[in-house]
Each structure stands twice: as C-alpha cells, then as structure tokens.
Image (cartoon, rainbow, N blue to C red):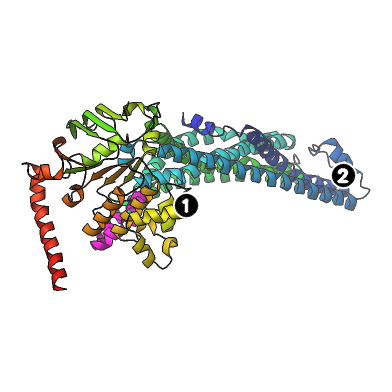
Amino acid sequence: MKFISLLKLTKGHTWGYIVLFILTIFHRFSYSYVPLFTQYLIRTLYVYIDPVNIDMNPVNFPGFVTDFFQSGQTVIEIALYVAITLIFFQAFRYLMMYFELYLRGRIQESIAKNLRVKLYDHIQNLSYKYHNNSDSGDLIQRVTSDVETTTGFIVLQLMQLVGLVASLLSGVFQMYYINQTIMWICLGVIPLYAVSSLFYFMKIEKIFDKVEKDESSMMTVIQENVSGNKVVKAFANEPYELEKMEVKNLQYTKSNIRANKVVAIYWGSMDFVSMSQYAIITILCIHYVREGIMDGASFIASLMLIGLLVWPIRGLGRLINEFTKAFVAIGRINHILDQKTEFEEDGQLEPEIKGHIIFNNVSFKFDDDHKYLLNNVTFEIKPGQTVAFIGKTGSGKSTIINILMRMYPYEGSITVDGVELKDIKKQHIRKYIGAVLQDPFLYSRSVYENISITNRNALDEEIKKAAVTAALEKDIHTFKNGYETMVGEKGTTLSGGQKQRVAIARVLVSEKPILVFDDALSAVDNKTDMMIRQALNEKTFKSTNIIITHRITTAKEADQIIVLNDGTIEAIGKHQELAHKEGLYQKLWGIQGRLEKEFLDMIKEGESHA
C-alpha cells in the first residue's frame, strides 16, 4: 500500500518518467562499453607484438565501430581512432547525463511542490478539534522533511534502483562475451544479497519509524520554546527548557545511534562479501591469464566490468535505507491526508447574512467527554444589536462563538437570518463573521499590512479610519515608520493592547455584518475600551456586535447582556435590570462597580485639585 502511495505521487509526470527511465538505462548500459575501448587498444598492441599467438574472443563492439578502428594503417592510427571515438562517446554520454540529472531534479521539485501544497491545503482544511490536539512542530516536519524524503526517493533513489539493475544486466551482458565462468560467479552471490537485504529492510523500517517520531518530538519542543520565548524568559525557565530539550535530544540521538549500528553491520557485511567476490574474481582472472584462457586485454576489461556487477550491489544497502525512510515518511504524510477535512460534512446554502442569530436549545459536548459544556442554551440576537456575554471562566462563552463559526458540531437549532446554521456553508458563514480573539495573531509584516490583510482592496482612508476607530492612530504616530513599522513575529514588538487594537482595526476594515470580540478589550484600559465601543456605535455600517468579556464596564453599555453559568443561561437583560437581580451578574457588579466608582471619584478629585 505504501509503495502504491509513492507511485501515485508520480501522476502527471508519466512522460517525464519514461524519458528519465530511458536516459538512466542508456547511461548505465553505455558505460559498459567504456572498458571495451581499453580491451580493444591492448588487444591491438598484442596483435602487433605477437599476431600468431592471439586467438581470443573478439571485442564486443558493433561491426561499424570495429570497421572504423581497423581503417587505420598503423597501430598509432588505430590508437588515435580509438581515443577520438572514446572522447566523442564520453562527451555524448555526459550530455545525456546532464539531461538526465536536469530532468530528474525538475520532476522531483515539481512533485515536491505539488505534494507540499496538497498537504498544506489539507492541513488547513482539517477540523478545529484536530489542530487543538496536534503538535505544530510535528506538522511542520511532515510538510518539509517528510516531503523531501518521499520525493527524493520516488525520483532519485527509484532511478538509482533502475540504474542498479541496468548496470548489473549490462555488466553481465559484456562479461558473457569475455568469460562466462566469471559471469556466473558474479551472479552467484545475488541470492545472498537479496535475502540479507530483505531481512535488513524488515529490521530497519521499525528503527527509522522510531527515529522519525523522536525527531518530531524534539522539533515540537524547539518550536514551542521559540514561540514561547517571552514566557520562558519571564519565569526564568531556561534551565527547565534546556533539560526538556536534552531529554528529547538524547532520545533522538539514541535512536539514531541504534539505526547507525544496524546500518554499519549490514553495510560492513555486504562490503566484506563484495570485496571477497572481487578478490576471488581477480585471482581467477590471473589464473586464466597464466593458463592462456584469457589474454591481458580481457583481464583488464574484466576488472573494470566487475565494478558494474559488484558496486551496484554494494549500493543496495543505501537504497534500502532511503526506501525505508520513504516508507516511514509517506506513512506519516498519508496519516494526515487520510484525516477527514471539516468540509466533508458541510452545508450547501449561501444566504445573505445580516446578523439575526437565534440559538434554540443548543447543547454541546466533546466526543470524548460525557459532560455538556453547553446545555439547552436559548437566546436571540437581532441585527445591529450589541450583545455581551458574561460568565465565569469555563462557563461556555467562547464555545458559543466557536459553534457560531461552525468550528464545532452542536445539538439543537441555530438560525442565522432564518436559515439553519448546519445548512450554511462553513466558509460562507465565516466570511461574514469578523472575530477578534483574546490573543490575536499578527503576521511578521508592517502594521498597515496586518490591518489590510482582511480586505486587500481597502483604501488608505479606510485603513486609517479603522485605526482611529480602534484607538490605534495615536500609537501609530509614535512609531518611527508609522504604518510601515514592521511587526515582529506574532506581534512581539507591540504591547498586548496594541496587538488587540491592530486586530480590532483589521476586523473593522473587513466590514463584516457580525463582529465578535472574544475578551478582545482585556488588554486596553477603561478609557480606550470606552472609546472603541463609542466608535463602534457611531459606525456608518451597523454590525451585530458580540462581546465576550469579564469586565462589567465593557458589558453594561450593551443592548443585551447574557449571563452564562456552568453552560446554561442564568439571566438575560440590560445592565440596570441585572444589577438589581440576585445572581452572578449582581455579584460581579458589586465587586467591579465599587472599583469603578472609586476610580471615577479619584479622577474627579484630581480634576478638582487641578
């Protein structure tokens, strides 16, 4: 199955493979004639010195080549003709070798490009749940090194296998005309090579699989450490991270050492057999020359041709290594490609989205959990409303947003503008929802590009207006390069509040009918929070705003507040109503409202003293 998977990757390159197959065979078969030039030249010298006692098999050249050589009148002319023919012959071989290597590289890169795109696209389309349970370092390795290993085998190593067989057969073919006994001795060890290679393959495949897994684990540690370097430094956790890396690195090193031991035993054994075979044939050739069965020309040609029989077999061990690594790599790639994408179960409708959302007895739990995170949740959000969700950590606030964006399946009914959410295409509904997450992701590009990334056609005025709405304009003017200031990887050069405001500006530029702020104002102060909410209310394009927050001051201006408690709705209403109603909201307001009053009193007192 794995080998069939490897061959499927060659789809679309049939003619390239046919040409490459022909060039590979030609390159190996044509080389088998190179030793014959030496044999013919030495044979000519023998004939010149002692023409009577030379009675050997003729050199296996085509008739027209022999006729050309014999057109020379003297030994010097014949040697010159042989040399000139060899030069042109080798030049032609090298020209064909150039096309072979060029075509080989081009096919490999083409297959690698297609496979990387296919794998990357498939990973993007996998479910939210899959990504939550996957290591990014492992996925990166599969898209990079595993792809290189796989495509390297199906082009480079596969053609080397073809070349190995071609070299073996061409060497046998030429040796047949020189001495058949030597030919059979060369072929006699092939069953030994075949059996030992089979056992070696069965052993090394499991070992290389362990090497790949250990390398993946090490890559994950490295990726996590590089991505979370701020956290590591903040807690002075470098010694712990180094220790964790040393453990994974040691596992990877031990797996590699174990693999190298098996490789060394196999290669060493095969080298011993090959060298023994070479020595036996050399001794036998010397014996045949002494007995007059072979002449010196045939002896030298035989030694040169033995390389075509012996060295390819020696290279079989390396091919088995690459073959095994390719099997492991394609298995890891297929493991990803065999995963169902989230779009295999999708809606078909693409209705107009305005932002009228109704949850009716909606429940949700994970497949591996018996407890419901949401239980019979029912509420309505009208178009243009600003609705705030309040609740303790783990009460299901973010889960509601994930369900609305069709990241998770759900029980019950959700309608968006009168259409059941399950019947709407996932990508369609996501196009109309702009989400600002608690920890927004920024690209390593300029501030301008990060804002405009959701709307490539946005005008400069629209970009700047969004920045003003998000209370980011003043910060941008303090940057040395303004809007062209480069943002570090994941926004590391910006403060938490600046990152969130860039993300808010980015979603405002997109002009979505539904805007979601998932605790997105937590990193900004109360004044900036108020400015952003006022700007949202004053927008010309009125969107449905869903705000998830722990801050009562952010929620109290909403048209509707929904209080969640342990996956159920405890209360729905406006601030004044909920603040005087016993429950979670009243408790939170009792704490946060008092702090807000003290804060406002301090401001007033400061202003009066001024």
Q: Is residue 234 above or below residue 297?
A: below
Q: Residue at x 75, y 39 (%)?
A: 293
In-image side of 339 versus 28 (left or right)? left
* Quarter location, residue 577: top left
**Viewer-proximal residue, 282 or 197?**
197
- Residue 351 in view: yes
Near-viewer residue (188 or 542)? 542
Measured along the vertical axis of the image, is residue 308 above or below residue 188?
Answer: below
- The residue shown at (29%, 51%) is 439
Q: Is residue 282 magenta?
A: no
Q: Is residue 503 left or right of residue 593?
A: right
Q: Is disc 2 surrounded by few (<14), some (14 to 19) or many (20+) residues within 10 Å?
A: many
Most extreme residue toward the left is 582
Q: Magenta residues?
A: 218-246
Instruction: Please say whether residue 227 is one of the residues in the magenta stretch.
Output: yes
Q: Which mark is residue 502?
A: none
Q: Is residue 284 left or right of residue 210?
A: right
Tag 1 residue? 459
Tell me: residue 153, above or below residue 608. above
Residue 516, position in %: x, y? Answer: 29, 43
User: Secondary structure beneath disc 2?
Assistant: helix
Q: Which mark is residue 69?
A: 2
Query: Tag 1's secondary structure?
Result: loop
